[in-house]
Each structure stands twice: as structure tokens, then as C-alpha cells.
Image (cartoon, rainbow, N blue to C red):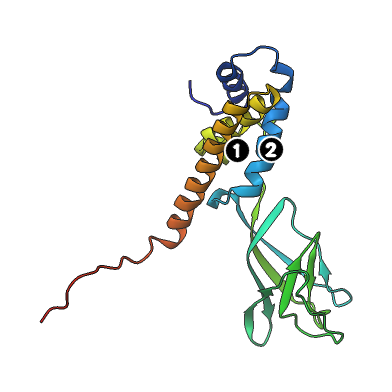
Amino acid sequence: MPITTYAELKSKIQTWGKRTDSVSLIDDFIDLAEADIWASLRIREMEARATATVSTSSRFLELPDNYLEMRRFKIDHASIGDTELTFRAPTSLIVIDSAGMPCFYTVTTQIEFDRVPDDDYTVEMEYYRKLTALSGSATSNAVLTNYPMIYLSGALRYFYLWAEDETNGLKYKKIFYGLIAETNLKNKRGQYGPAPTIIMGYPIA
């Protein structure tokens, strides 16, 4: 039976785990697996775009809902057009006292610019976001539809952690992170294409 819905996923976890005393905990196993998925998986289906207008009285901007990681961040300037903003680690962001067009930003619990904007600039973000968490009312999402084994192996990892079965727990942890790495690589190739091939040989006379 394919795994396309939340109910089917729960059924498979119970079947593969071969225990009936875990039924009340399966929702927890899926929730824990989802936390790992959002921390590690980066696929096209998780990409989003948002725009916002910055404030001239604050150098802070709220993050979009379900934000995970920035891919691209630019600011629209009426005179010079779109300008890319450069990321800095929170400890490396140098804050300038005078107002002006921001050049750098960092991300903590919010977006922080290197200075207070001197105009109502429009910023555009391309970022990765969490998808809708699985539940009885949200029975599927793009990860479950396209990569069901990621969900299954992630949940079984916690099933066996609960069951104090270290061998199977480590097995499914390895499977889970192997699938994450493989899926991320395939999506990266889909976005950027394969790396250039270097052909070694002798020069032609």
C-alpha cells in the first residue's frame, strides 16, 4: 500500500514497528520526525517568496511565517533598482548609527539590518519554509507525497528510540539522513544542473 496520507503513514509505522502498544505515541513520532525534516531538508517544494516594506524608524523586520532559511534577499531602490543584501553572522554584523539604505543583514528571531533605512524600501525574500505539518485535518504535504520514506524512516527512528532498540534506531537514523542528503543533492542538481565534467587526456598534436 502506498503512503500518501497521514492515516496511511501512521498505519505503516505501526506495521513496520510490529507493536500495538505504541499506537498512542505515533503522532509524537511523526512530530519529532518533522522537526528533523525541517531542520535538514531543502527542496523546491519548500521555497517561498515574500515582499515587505521596511520601516524608517527601526532596523528590524519580522520574519515570514514558517521561515527556515534565506536563499536570496534584495532591496528595491527607486534610482538604482534591485540591490542584493549581503548576509552577516549575528556576531559579525556592524551596526551603523546613521540612517541609509541597508547593505547587510542577519537573522536571529527577526531580520536585522546594519542600519535604520532612510526610506520605505521594498524588500523581497526568497527563502525556505516549513510545509504544513501533518495532522488529522492536514493529511498530506509535498514531502509525504514525493518522499514518503523520509517520513517513515524518520518516525521509525523515534519509534525504536522509545522501544529502547538501539540497533534499529541507529539503522533508521542512517536511512533517514541518507535520504535527506540524497534528496537535497537531487534538488540542487535540478536547480543548478550537474557540475562541469573535466576530461583528462593527452593534448592533440
Q: Residue at x 54, y 32 (%)?
A: 171
**Residue 46 vs residue 68, the one in the foreground:** 68
Q: Residue at x 61, y 29 (%)?
A: 169
Check the picture and name the quadrant holding the C terminus. bottom left
| Residue ranking furthest to the left | 205
Report whether residue 136 is seen.
no
Q: Quadrant of residue 198?
A: bottom left
Q: Quadrant of residue 15?
A: top right
**Residue 180 vs residue 133, the one in the foreground:** 180
**Residue 199 vs residue 10, the one in the foreground:** 199
Q: Residue at x 61, y 48 (%)?
A: 40
Where's residue 75, x and y in %?
Answer: 68, 75
Label 1, label 2: how many angstroms apart (C-alpha)?
Answer: 8 Å
What residue does disc 2 label?
133
Where's residue 47, x and y in %?
Answer: 59, 54
Q: Is residue 43 above or below residue 124?
A: above
Q: Amino acid at mark 1?
A: Asn
Q: Residues within 10 Å of mark 1 (few under 14, many from 20)?
A: some
Mark positioned earlier in the residue sequence (1 or 2): 2
Q: Amino acid at mark 2?
A: Ala
Q: Residue at x 74, y 57 (%)?
A: 64
Where's residue 196, x and y in %?
Answer: 35, 67
Which circle marks residue 6 in the picture?
Answer: none
Q: Is residue 191 above or below residue 94?
A: above
Q: Secondary structure at mark 2?
A: loop
| Residue ranking furthest to the right | 57
What residue does disc 1 label?
141
Where's residue 61, x and y in %?
Answer: 81, 66
Q: Is residue 149 above or below residue 203?
A: above
Given contact means CB atoms under 8 Å apart, are the residues at marks 1 and 2 in contact? yes
In-image side of 204 versus 191 (left or right): left
Q: Secondary structure at mark 1?
A: loop
